[in-house]
Structures are given as structure tokens and as C-alpha cells.
């Protein structure tokens, strides 16, 4: 690649081009960089993926085709633009996380649809849902941006986060980021896989501690009908440690009634642990493959058997087992599995597995 060895600002092209094209020449034309290259694979699919990579990376460019060759003219200055669909989904998720949980709680004891709506609007008017929305969205946002930042740092092109609204008890199915380029090695795989859960977990812990400090213990007969009541049975090691410190020990026949912040923090721990299961394309699958390579498949199947067994106590685990079967239990190799991982990547991977062990909730819902 002409000039690339001497021009650091040209090296950004490597992750965008090398797996799709054979580079013939690179030269400068004013502020722009011109690359002539030939296709490695089928032209139409290659062009679609390549154009998407360039747009997501924030580059302006033009392409000129001739026979089997392609000439790319690109401005190396990036201009980040968040796609409209991502912004719309974020706004819809913000609304669903705010409205839907309050709507579900307002159904308890209500006889008619109009009564449910009156209760919902009255609760929202009194400030219900605001704290939960702020906590839940911040946990999800930091988690996904952890992935996003780590991907950009390692030259892996990804989409912006897609937030997913949902008609469930928390108002969302979370968020996803779609990768548009391969993982180059196991170091990158671990760092990208672990950055999101670690970042989101830290935020979840902060909200949990804040919320627990304002939560209460009530006898079962005094728990409001529209409130979720918690015990420590079936809870994670972390919850069993933190709840008695910040709330106290619940006597027999009593339950913990969490604030919205504490509930969001609890959900954050649960979702983080679910993502860290060592299965296929879950974050945990990335991390465990990066750390152990072929052992990930064995650990993934052990986790799947565990999910199927735990589903008899809490059917939510069958949903995650279904995702595992649909997207695959084994993790595919990176472009260069032989390259050694770094101490930083290994530390991040081990930290993520510790988070899984202390945050995993065997029976989240009964």
C-alpha cells in the first residue's frame, strides 16, 4: 500500500478494507486519499457492506468502478452522524421505559381500562417512573457505549446502539449494536465483549446502592398491591451481601420493597449476568472464547443445560436458552486466533467473569 507506511492518518483504512479487497495503490489528492483496489469476494455484497462501514465510521467518500477494480476517494476527516432510526428507537424506548412499567403496576386491582389509565396518568403526574427511567436508560446506554467505544478503539466498525422498546415489566428488551467488520484477534474480542458489561455493571451498582439506602422492609400484609416485593431467596451473592447492609435483615413474613432506583439496579445486575453467559454471540461467549478458545463450546453447552434446568424454577431462563439455540452455542473464530491476548484484555475478561459469578440470579422471577 503506497505511502501507508509513512502516513499514520492513512492507516485507518486497514480495518475497513483488508478483509474485503486487495489493495493495489494508495496516493493523496489534496486533502483526500485515493485507493485503487480489487475485489476478494462477490461484488454486490462487498459494496453494500463496504459502503455501510464507511458511513458508520463517519467518512465522506466517492466510489468509481471499472471491471473488477474499484477506486475509492475518501476524506480522512470523520463526521459522526447518528442515524435517524437509532434516534427514533431511543425516544420510543425512553417513552416505553417511562410509561409501560407504571401502566402494568396500575392494573393491580383495577376493574376497567379507564380505571387503569386514570391510575397510570395519576401516578405519572406524581412523578412515578422518572427515577426508574433515568436509572434504566443510563445503565443500558453506558453498557452499549462501552461496546461502541471499545470497538472504535480497536478498529472494529459497528452500528450505533439500537434501543428496543417493549411491552414488558421494564418497558424494553435492552439495546444491541451490530458489528459490520470482523473481530481481528482474541484481544479485541475480549475487550469489546467485556467493556459493555463492566461499564453498565458499575452504573447499575451505583443506582442499586442509592436505591437500597431508601428502600424499606414491610410485613407481607402491608406490601402495597401494586409493588414488587423481594426476598433474598434465589438472589445473587451480591444482593445477599448488599441488601442487609443498606436495608437491614427482613424478619420472617416480611419483604423488601425497593425504590425505583433499587429495582433498576437489580434489573441491571440481572441483565448484565444474562449477557455474560458463555454462549455463542452473548458478551460472555465473546469473552470466554477469547480467554479459552475451543473450551468455550463446552462451557457454552454446560450453560445451556443449566438454563434449561433453571427454567423449571423461573421460565425466563428458557427464553435465553432459546436465544442460545437460535444464534448458536459455539463462538466462531476471529481473523487471527494465534495472536496472544494482552494483560489488559485478560484482566477485563476475568473481571467480567467475576461479575457474572456474583451477580447471577438463579430465580429472578417466580
Image (cartoon, rainbow, N blue to C red):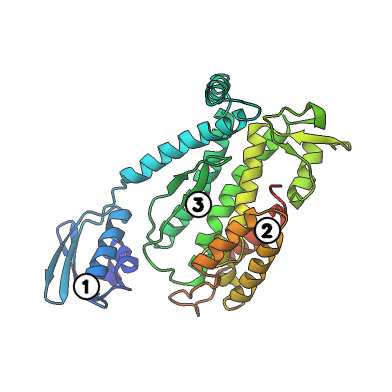
Q: Residue at x 48, y 36 (%)?
A: 96
Q: Residue at x 58, y 66 (%)?
A: 279
Mark closest to the chain's N terminus, 2 or 1:
1
Q: CA distance from mark 1 to mark 3?
A: 33 Å
Which residue is under mark 1? 43
Q: Is residue 144 left or right of residue 278?
A: left
Q: Nearer the viewer, residue 254 or 106?
A: 106
Q: Around disc 3, counting alpha carbons within 10 Å, would you say few (fewer than 14), some (14 to 19), or many (20 or more)? A: many
Which residue is under mark 2? 311
Residue 334 percent location from the top left of the image: 46, 74
Residue 217 percent location from the top left of the image: 80, 31
Q: Is residue 63 left or right of residue 57?
A: left
Which residue is under mark 3? 146
Q: Is residue 50 above or below residue 198?
A: below
Q: Residue at x 32, y 55 (%)?
A: 57
Q: Around disc 2, counting alpha carbons within 10 Å, would you say few (fewer than 14), some (14 to 19), or many (20 or more)? A: some
Residue 24 percent location from the top left of the image: 20, 77
Q: Is residue 52 above or below residue 364?
A: below
Amino acid at each position: 500500500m503506497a505511502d501507508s507506511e509513512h502516513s499514520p492518518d492513512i492507516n485507518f483504512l486497514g480495518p475497513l478494507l483488508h478483509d474485503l479487497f486487495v489493495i493495489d495503490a494508495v496516493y493523496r489528492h489534496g486533502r483526500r486519499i485515493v485507493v485503487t483496489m480489487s475485489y476478494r469476494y462477490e461484488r454486490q455484497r462487498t459494496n453494500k457492506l463496504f459502503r455501510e462501514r464507511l458511513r458508520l465510521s463517519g467518512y465522506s467518500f466517492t466510489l468509481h468502478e471499472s471491471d473488477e477494480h474499484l477506486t475509492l476517494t475518501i476524506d480522512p476527516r470523520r463526521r459522526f452522524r447518528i442515524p435517524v432510526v437509532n434516534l427514533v428507537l431511543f425516544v420510543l424506548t425512553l417513552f416505553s421505559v417511562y410509561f409501560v412499567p407504571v401502566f402494568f403496576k396500575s392494573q393491580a386491582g383495577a376493574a376497567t381500562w379507564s380505571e387503569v389509565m386514570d391510575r397510570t396518568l395519576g401516578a405519572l403526574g406524581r412523578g412515578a417512573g422518572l427515577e426508574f427511567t433515568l436509572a434504566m436508560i443510563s445503565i443500558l446506554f453506558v453498557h452499549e457505549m462501552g461496546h461502541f467505544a471499545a470497538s472504535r478503539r480497536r478498529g472494529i466498525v459497528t452500528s450505533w446502539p439500537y434501543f428496543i422498546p417493549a411491552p414488558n415489566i421494564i418497558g424494553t428488551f435492552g439495546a444491541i449494536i451490530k458489528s459490520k467488520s470482523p473481530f481481528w484477534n482474541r484481544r479485541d474480542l475480549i475487550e469489546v465483549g467485556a467493556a459493555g458489561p463492566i461499564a453498565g455493571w458499575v452504573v447499575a451498582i451505583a443506582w442499586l446502592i442509592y436505591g437500597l439506602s431508601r428502600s424499606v422492609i414491610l410485613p407481607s400484609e402491608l406490601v402495597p398491591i401494586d409493588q414488587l416485593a423481594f426476598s433474598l431467596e434465589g438472589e445473587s451473592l451480591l444482593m445477599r451481601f448488599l441488601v442487609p447492609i443498606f436495608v437491614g435483615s427482613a424478619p420472617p413474613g416480611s419483604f423488601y420493597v425497593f425504590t425505583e432506583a433499587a429495582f433498576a439496579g437489580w434489573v441491571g445486575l440481572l441483565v448484565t449476568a444474562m449477557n455474560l453467559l458463555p454462549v455463542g454471540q452473548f458478551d460472555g461467549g465473546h469473552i470466554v472464547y477469547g480467554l479459552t478458545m475451543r473450551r468455550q463450546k463446552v462451557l457454552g453447552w454446560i450453560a445451556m443445560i443449566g438454563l434449561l434446568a433453571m427454567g423449571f424454577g423461573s421460565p425466563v431462563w428458557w427464553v435465553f436458552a432459546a436465544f442460545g439455540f437460535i444464534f448458536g452455542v459455539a463462538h466462531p473464530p476471529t481473523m487471527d486466533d494465534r495472536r496472544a491476548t494482552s494483560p489488559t484484555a485478560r484482566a477485563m475478561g476475568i473481571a467480567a467473569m467475576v461479575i457474572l459469578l456474583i451477580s447471577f440470579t438463579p430465580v429472578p422471577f417466580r
